[in-house]
């Protein structure tokens, strides 16, 4: 079983940068793909992108291409989601998620709430 | 981009059957998954590969997928099944979620 533990809630101002993290159990990122999912307040789930273990770059959903950067450090079993210039519309809960044994998400982090407000 | 459409809400009486649809172009040619999300919690996988249940998911949850529609069926619905349900499929190498259906048990 894979455990995913995400970093804590963040409060930022528009224009600031941010990097949130998702730490997995041992070797989880060498055997599982990692996805990031956004959930805006009161809204549904949105697939942001996915990082496959054998690929160096993440694949982004069209709405998120160029807006965020996903990365991972397999040596410390940690995935990251980062913004260079936050907007108020980035206010949301962000989940990391993992899968690999079948086409579905088996494991979810607890979510990181990002609030962007002036 | 690929779109999956679900009804916004479904109401069901305790002990009755609830059916939730998920529509997308040629969805039957892809694998569909279903997730349950209770308020304030992370989603959990309840159906994968159209009709497979992960370990620990009650048998009253079942799935099917054909044509342009995948369906989640909850038999003998219990109050604990009140939640929002999302379908999910793959568009090439990235995932797509459905719009979500809130199930109310009353």
Image (cartoon, rainbow, N blue to C red):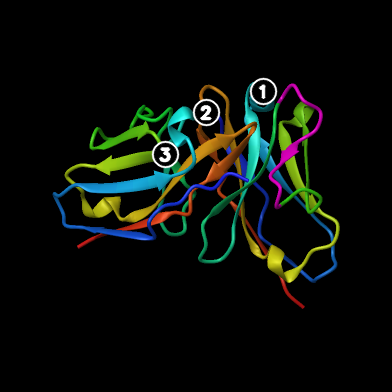
- Residue B46 or A110: which is nearer the viewer? B46
Q: Which residue is mark 2?
A: A103
Q: Which residue is mark 1?
A: A27
Rendered location of residue B96, percent (x, y): 56, 43
Q: How many marks?
A: 3
Separation (CA) of disc 3 from disc 2: 18 Å
Of marks 1 and 3, the one in the foreground: 3
Q: Circle 2 — which element?
A: loop
User: Do tag 3 and tag 2 residues touch (Cβ < 8 Å)?
Assistant: no
User: Do tag 1 and tag 2 residues touch (Cβ < 8 Å)?
Assistant: no
Q: Quadrant of residue B73?
A: top left
Rendered location of residue B47, percent (x, y): 38, 34
**Eyeballing the image, is A102 above or below B75?**
above
In the rendered image, which quarter contains the C terminus of chain A?
Answer: bottom right
Left or right: A82 in relation to B73: right
Q: Which residue is mark 3?
A: B68
What span is in magenta? A53-63
Q: Chain of mark 3?
A: B
**Eyeballing the image, is A13 above or below B105?**
below
């Amino acid at each position: 079983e894979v455990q995913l533990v995400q970093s804590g809630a963040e409060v930022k101002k528009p224009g600031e940068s941010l990097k949130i993290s998702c730490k997995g159990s041992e070797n989880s990122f060498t055997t599982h793909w990692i996805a990031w999912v956004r959930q805006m307040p009161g809204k549904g789930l949105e697939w942001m992108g996915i990082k496959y273990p054998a690929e160096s770059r993440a694949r982004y959903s069209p709405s998120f291409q160029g807006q965020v950067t996903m990365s991972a450090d397999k040596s410390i079993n940690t995935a990251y989601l980062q913004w260079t210039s936050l907007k108020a519309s980035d206010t949301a809960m962000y989940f990391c998620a993992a899968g690999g044994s079948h086409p579905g998400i088996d494991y979810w982090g607890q979510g990181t709430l990002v609030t962007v407000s002036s | 981009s690929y779109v999956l459409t679900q009804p916004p809400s479904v109401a069901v009486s305790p002990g009755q059957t609830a059916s939730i649809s998920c529509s997308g172009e040629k969805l039957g040619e892809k694998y569909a998954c279903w997730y349950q999300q209770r308020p304030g919690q992370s989603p959990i996988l309840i159906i994968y590969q159209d009709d497979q249940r992960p370990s620990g998911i009650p048998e009253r949850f079942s799935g099917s997928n054909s044509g342009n529609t995948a369906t989640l069926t909850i038999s003998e619905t219990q109050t604990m099944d009140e939640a929002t349900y999302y379908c999910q499929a793959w568009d090439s190498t990235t995932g797509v979620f459905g719009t979500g259906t809130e199930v109310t048990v009353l």
